[in-house]
Image (spheres, rainbow, N blue to C red):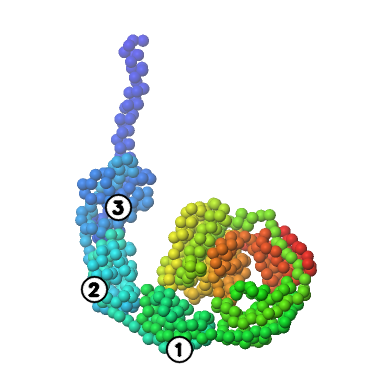
Amino acid sequence: MTPTRWFWVRTAPILVLVLFVLASWPAAIGAQSATLSGPSQAVIGAPLPITWTGPGVAQDFISIDQPGQPESAYGPYVYAPQGNPAALTAPDTPGRYVVRYHSGESGYRVMATHEVEVIDAAASLVMPASVDAGGELTLNWTGPGNPSDFISIDAVGADDRLYGPYAYATTSPAVIRAPDEPGTYVVRYHLANSYRVIGRASLVVGTVTASLSAPAQVAAGGELQVTWTGPGGQSDYISVDSAGSPEIEYGPYEYTAGGSPAVIRVPERPGAYQVRYHIGGSSAVIGSTPLEVLPNSATVSGPPSAAGGRTFSVEWTGPDNAGDYVTIVPAGAPDRDYLSYAYTSVGTPATLEAPLEPGVYEIRYMTGVRRDVLASASIDVTPGVIPGRLLVVSETGASATLGAIEVILDASGSMLQRIDGERRIQIARDALTRLVRDVIPAGKPFALRVFGHREADSCRTDLEMPLAALNAASATATIQGVQAMNLARTPIAASLRLVRSDLAGATGPALVVLVTDGEETCDDDPLAAIAELRAAGIDVRVNIVGFAIDEHQLREQFEAWARAGGGLYVEAHDREELQRAMAVTVETPFEVLRGADVVTTGVVNGEVVSLAPGQYRVRVLAGAATAEYPVEVTAGGEHRVPVS
């Protein structure tokens, strides 16, 4: 083979490859081109849709830039794959801009441009020159009305980014609640992104007062009728407060939206108080009148002794306020303890049942709210019915069988009250943190809903942690960030109604744990909400943790809600009890029934239950997997009921 022939044989494949690359190069370059089209003008802060063609790979982006900027410098942007047209927003500063398509690769090469002029806009505000402190300011406005633009009542001379009470510029007229502090203010229209002010008007907030008329004295725990005049703002309220307490601290209250007169149940602790009219936003007091709460007295009497498990009669006298009751407890038991009880509303004598265990006991007259002991009498319980002991056991851990867990946390105004110097909300946060960190297994589907923490005088409820595999560190950060809101309401029913959507996609039995320190205050029906949830075909049970619950009737109400939800009611009054209660909620509950009556409740693998001899059914509450186990309890017998 000649040298020339050898050369062409060896180099021909390389030349073919080079020719192929050169032929395809223009096509490859064309495939990496882009185009942009859209409006040539846009108003400040307005949506700026840009239609594009181009590679659309993951990191490519479209930005609004200053003319002449280097390719590596850019302004506000959206990633190209997020949509076409790209949803940009015009800058808040007028001028000429260039929209650019950038490659996501190093250097951010510009592949297409489109020029746009951003034109300025102004806003006008038409409104009264003055408004009462805490009153509602109604104003008509014109302006760009861009998404999230807002109008606020601000301090004179404040920076554009510092603003006071506000309303979004969505419809005209806008209504804004005026500050509680009288003085001269400025009402300003702010653009959403930069808070730049494009319209303003002066406003004088005037002094406002209220007058109150009420009896000078009332018996502890009774009802007080208060006639009032005042601004009557939506979140204004009248309360019975300790004499000399700061304005931000208040006792039992009613919103003025309910009209005059307001009827308030006074504290059960006698002493000097003030009836005060508070403006809702700051709790500033604009009217007050003194009140003396007088002490109550009561008597109870019963037989000197009663046989265990038998009924006996109790005679009583006392205030008979709503929720007052008589009960029997072991001698020296804490005030909130009770065994058999009867409400004083049934009259005297009342009928109680002696405990099964012999010993020294007390009959007590209890107030319905604070559960104060107004009177007591000693009674000996002698041997009577000999109880048997029941233990319900299972080898399967409760949390392992659950498909998902959702906690609903109350962060309403009452959670700002203190227990042993700590706010209730802090105690609740710590107990919930311990639950997600030490009790619920990592990776378990978990959701957190919170109400009361966003807006005062609001029934808002928020899903703060959508359903996802539990990450203890992430959950702890969210939980510890929850703050209670003064005067926020308690939308228990609304929160329960949202559980169905919160747990959409969950498989297996689900558990809802409601942690609350108060009753529903949003004119709804939690019992109906629970019934709807259970009837919706979801395998779910509802446990309720009552925290610092004083009212005996409220406790009964929570028990009824938990029973309707196929779950358990647990009560806690301090930090240690709340941590224990939260841990118990993820265990499997059971009821002991005699006929149709629920005799007692407990949790599987929990404490031993004492029962009078007889035929019972143990009903294990595990969502749709609810099962019953018959058991005969004998006098003095030990009975283990194994459940699956």
Q: Earlier in the sequence, mark 1 or mark 2?
A: 2
Earlier in the chain: of badge 1 and badge 3, it is 3
Which is more foreground, mark 1 or mark 3? 1
Q: Which residue is mark 3?
A: 76
- Residue 443 at what x, y percent from top left? 54, 51
| Residue 550 in view (yes/no) | yes
Which label is found at residue 202?
Answer: 2
- Name the quadrant of the N terminus: top left
Place of residue 536 in the rendered image (x, y in percent of width and height, measured from the top left):
57, 65
Q: Position of residue 463 (x, y in %)?
A: 47, 62
Q: Residue at x 33, y 10 (%)?
A: 2
Q: Could you give the CA–CA distance between mark 2 and mark 3, rounded to whole angstroms? A: 34 Å
Q: Is residue 343 left or right of residue 62?
A: right
Q: Quadrant of the C terminus?
A: bottom right
Residue type at tag 2: Ser
Q: 210 and 291: which one is in front?
A: 291
Quarter occupied by residue 333: bottom right
How packed mark 1 is, by other alpha carbons closer than 10 Å (few <14, some 14-19, many 20 or more), is some
Residue identifier under label 1? 216
